[in-house]
Amino acid sequence: MTDRADPAAERSVDPVVVAALARKYAVIRELRIAHADGSEVDPRDRMRQLAQEFPGALRELDELPFETIEARLAALGRPRPPRWADAMGRFHGWVRLALAVKRRFTRGSDPSEARRWLLEARPRGPGEPPDAALTDEVLAAILRPPGGRLSRWALERVALEVGRTVAAVEGEIFECLKKTP
């Protein structure tokens, strides 16, 4: 996907996020090649690690065309990373953070307890939101996502942060995963 000349396209992408995404696509490529070669090595541990660091990546492993995996790796190696890398990193960051909160707290938990835990006890991963974004309102939404859809909620958060519509962000991140009827 090409970047259009607009202010959002000029946003710099955190190099830590770019490196993490490159690692993700390298692992996806390695797993795909090992599977195609009939490797006897059990991939479950690597797949579990991939899913923990990059929620949603197993869907990419299953559904992305190999050419897209290669193209994304190449794009992440360029001096100016593609715009989708920023949105993808933020999406993984929000979902990873939200899943950690949901594993530790119940739906009825006080959001301020979750915030305290996030700020004091949990290390931050690549693409995760800044402390200021972790308001009680946001954490309440994580504990009880609107419509029960955490991924959709995360897409909405990313869209707010990058100043684009949910549909635009979703298209950027998941363009190659859309099923055609």
Image (cartoon, rainbow, N blue to C red):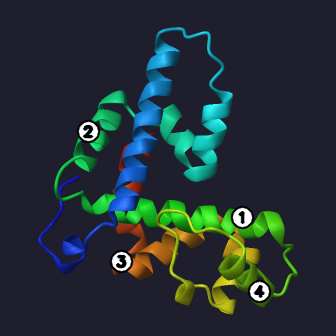
Q: In this view of the protein, can residue 149 be seen by the observer?
A: no
Residue 158, numbered circle: none
Crowdedness near tag 4: few (<14), some (14–19) or many (≥20) residues, C-alpha within 10 Å? many
Q: Residue at x 67, y 32 (%)?
A: 45
Determine whether, in the image, residue 112 is placed left or right of residue 63: right
Question: Which amino acid type is marked by label 2?
Answer: Ala
Give the residue number, with chain letter if any, for mark 1: 100
Q: Residue at x 18, y 50 (%)?
A: 78
Crowdedness near tag 2: few (<14), some (14–19) or many (≥20) residues, C-alpha within 10 Å? few
Tell me whether the residue at label 1 lies in contact with that at label 3, contact meaning CB atoms closer than 8 angstroms.
Answer: no
Q: What secondary structure is found at the residue carrying circle 1?
A: helix
Residue 71, numbered circle: 2
Residue 111, numbered circle: 4
Q: Residue at x 46, y 67 (%)?
A: 90
Question: Which amino acid type is marked by label 3?
Answer: Val
Name the spot of residue 36 as percent of width and height, x first.
47, 14
Look at the picture and state if 27 lies above or below 88. Answer: above
Q: Count every numbered label the image shows and give the total.
A: 4
